[in-house]
Image (cartoon, helix red, strand yellow):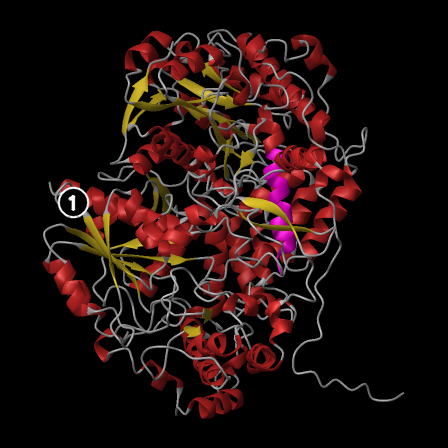
Amino acid sequence: MQRITRTNKTRDFHQAKWNEPIIFELHQPGEKGVELPPVNKEVALAVGDGISVIPEAMQRKGRLGLPEIGQARVLRHYVRLSQETLGSDFNVEIGQGTCTMKYIPKINELLIRDPKMMELHPLQNEETVQGMLEIFHKLDLCMREISGMDCFSFQPGSGTQALFAMASIVRKYHESRGEGDQRNEIITTIFSHPSQAATAAVKGYKIITLHPDEDGFPDIDKLKAAVSERTAGFVVANPEDTGIFNPRIKEFTDIVHQAGGLCFYDQANANGLLGITRAKEAGFDMCFFNLHKTFAAPHMCGGPATGALGVIAKLKEFLPAPIVEHRDGKYSLQYDLEQSIGKVRSFHGVAQTVLRAYAWIRALGAEGLKEVAKIAVLNNNYMYHKVLAIRGASAPYVKGHRLEQVRYSWEQMTKETGVTTEDVTRRMTDFGLHYWTSHHPYIVKQPFTLEPTESYSKEDLDEYIHALEQISKEAYENPEIVKSAPHNSTIHKMDEQDFLDHPDKWCITWRSYLKKTAVVEAAK
Amino acid sequence: MTQKVHPYIPNMVPKVQEEMLKVIGAKNIMELYSCIPDELKLKENMNIPPALTEYELRRHIEGILNKNTSTKEYLNFLGAGCWQHFIPAVCDEINQRSEFLTAYAGEPYEDHGRFHALFEYQSLVAELVDMDVVNVPTFDWGQAAATSIRMAARITGKKKVLLTKTTAPERRDIIINYGTPDLQFEFVHFDVKTGAMDLKDLKAKLTEDVAALYFENPSYLGFIEEQGPEISKLLKGNQSLMVVGVDPISLGVMAPPSHYGADIICGDLQPLGMHMNFSGGQAGFIATRDEVKFVQEFPSRLFGIVPTVKEGEYGFGDVYYDRTSFALREEGKESVGTQTALWGITAGVYLALLGPDGMYEVGQAIMQNSQYAVQRLNQIPNITGSCLNSPFFKEFVVDFNHTGLSVEELNKRLLEKKIFGGKDLSNEFPEFGQSALYCVTEVHTKEDIDHLVQSIKEVIEK
């Protein structure tokens, strides 16, 4: 036997390609995917067919157009589709900056599948869900320590919904003081998540967006000019999506408070801050954390998730109801919150994710949480140095260290080679890696945002860096390979034309596809 | 003693840290935090208990969870927005797949399967509701209704919204908070004998400025609203839209709202393959016709099918992305972000497994079992199995006013008999006095129902 030589710096990869049909094409009349529990004969005898009581106009006429498929074929179809999906269990998931893609502990997934969690109805008598309420309460206590806030609600189903809940609280708070109509502006920054501006607009606010100064910091003079008796609130991430921490944040919150506004903190970028610095000391009245980001709950293709919403004591009565209280050894649901905004999500929110976050915190302890932050920052700064050494890459704004992520730019490479950040996205797929550009608008030209988290080893980081180096090299030497990528993916480059943006051409469902393509076929 | 390396944090290894710091040109990690002023740095340690090993953690969490009693141990008749249904094992198998569980926002190339599965989910739900456009799911029914209503307001350019008084109270709270301050809400009365919408009151409130009417069918109280066609006629005459919330598991036997004039349909996917999870199984959907005026108002992502440069391959991407807040921030339609995509995939698996016959059978089984329960409850003196005398789907209002017991007391005693009784409606709907909303589905056997009836009898007679 001879030694097998493995010299590739980048991974010799090919994504699964099953070329699966659309599920409707698997239709085989008469096949069946599952059998339902039978109806007892005596029941049927007592009530008849059960459905003729439905008034005529409310009866379903005709057969549903769903496919008929045997169980094994349904399973195989979806397992194959899962294989064509690059979850974070499979790749060095550094490329989805701002989203804190970290290791998802398997023990937590095992715990949430306990029937004593999975099979609980949200309206059960409190006596029968004491364990669940205990977990909500204990996570609340941990989150208070992490943030300095006084009470948490886990009802919001994502960061966006937590932002919406905070904007709702801002409105209700000012209304309770008779200033609801007068205070109609919310101030945010351009490097904060789009949802900050979008959710505040849903609550009827005029949005004032601050652009950065030349070093990339939110501009304090612009804030001073923006605040007035119309200011309802100020919402910001810190660090922003650039990974730049605003050291003058306390001055910002002071300015807004002096103008009578509330300050709320988007802590989607909290992974480098655990045990280091908190919302309270920076002067915030509210904050939220994504349990599916910083606290290691999985992202599940985009939810279900939790935006854990914390407030200072004076805003507790505004929270969406119910919250969990602990008194005399008993846990209870408190619905009676005098100024509550009502509800943002049904019942108690996504309980599985609450359990996952609690389990993750307990697996780390106070010291471990601080290690998470420190290593996330170490990993990021290591990458930062390595990426800046790649031809054509840069990171605009202030020099020096960044926190847990960096917004980079390929502007120079695009100018010199024509290869864009979108091209890089597709080419990274060929190496078994995910890479994301950035949220719009592209203030940083040809952007990409990397967030290596604490989960990856130096070797993992090097693999990602090598892939970027390889693509830069290709861009300068053989740009076509990048522009025509992907080459090792499930599918080839899409022929988008205006298939996604023209009403006559877009097909959002299979039935719509069949109708619209029938017209085209008939015209041939 | 050197610090232990945590299994989740590989770069705690001191030698590796040294190498990395050398590359960075820093002496230690805290130097990287020089951007944070000292006065903002946390001085004390967080009061969080020390780390547990995996085994200790498992013991700790299981110890806490053991204080719960689940619907596997007790017989459950609670519904009211979260329902117990049969869940095929394949649904769990697919949504526990590590690829789907840990994927997020990948591109259509590395996450082709995620796009493909969600396009199929859209397509399968489209068959249920008989409409051509379905979104990637939103948080829950309440949010789906709230967004459907805001869409209707934008489409019509009007600000007043009518809701039936029988709208689920939780959903009503979500809708109102989401619509405030832009929209004004008014409530349409219902007939307390049947639950049906009071059309006279609807006519009176249907002023020119009404953007939409929202009602649920089957309703929160379980009854079937049969006046759909008449309601639709009234709305069309007023250039107002009809938004209908629906329980998708009813649609194998009940007409989809599109058949009686709905412009926008919304509802909760939880019955289609999601465990109750103490309310973590909720997921909302929205469906419309394929018309620009509707499509352009969706805040959600909508996945569409496209060709690739290679013949024979399906590709997928975002339809009309430039309407979203991802593209336009506050100028986009409401907001978009993480919602409940995994439950969308699961609902697709559920519908693919059940097929047309399964959806018909499950609807029929639910109706037979629930009617049987009402029939049996009616045999108990002083109880009315369903105090609304209209047909119902899986939920019904049981009238306990003549038992001399409050629902609270009765439910306490049922609990002693290992039964979760129906939801106490005395606060939400005082017009029904001491009544409870019971839910019976395909999971309840004749023995389960007989046991409930016998237990209620014993409690009342005691």
**In terms of depth relative to the viewer, which is nearer, B261 or A104?**
B261
User: Do we see residue A98 in this rendering?
Assistant: yes
Residue, x 41% and y 57% (percent of image)?
Answer: A290
Q: Which amino acid does the dot numbered 1 rest on? A: His
Query: Where is residue A182, by image quadrant?
Result: top left
Outermost residue to the front = A524
Identify the magenta region.
B110-125
Residue under pointer 1: A174
Residue A283 place in picture, x, y as percent: 20, 64
**Eyeballing the image, is B441 above or below B104?**
above
User: Do we see residue B4 in this rendering?
Assistant: no
**In terms of depth relative to the viewer, which is nearer, A57 or A294?**
A57
**Residue B118 lies in the magenta-colored region:** yes
* Left or right, residue B18 beside residue B308: left
**In terms of depth relative to the viewer, which is nearer, A65 or A271?**
A65
Residue, x 50% and y 39% (percent of image)?
Answer: B282
Dominant secondary structure of the magenta stretch?
helix
* Left or right, residue B9 beside residue A185: right
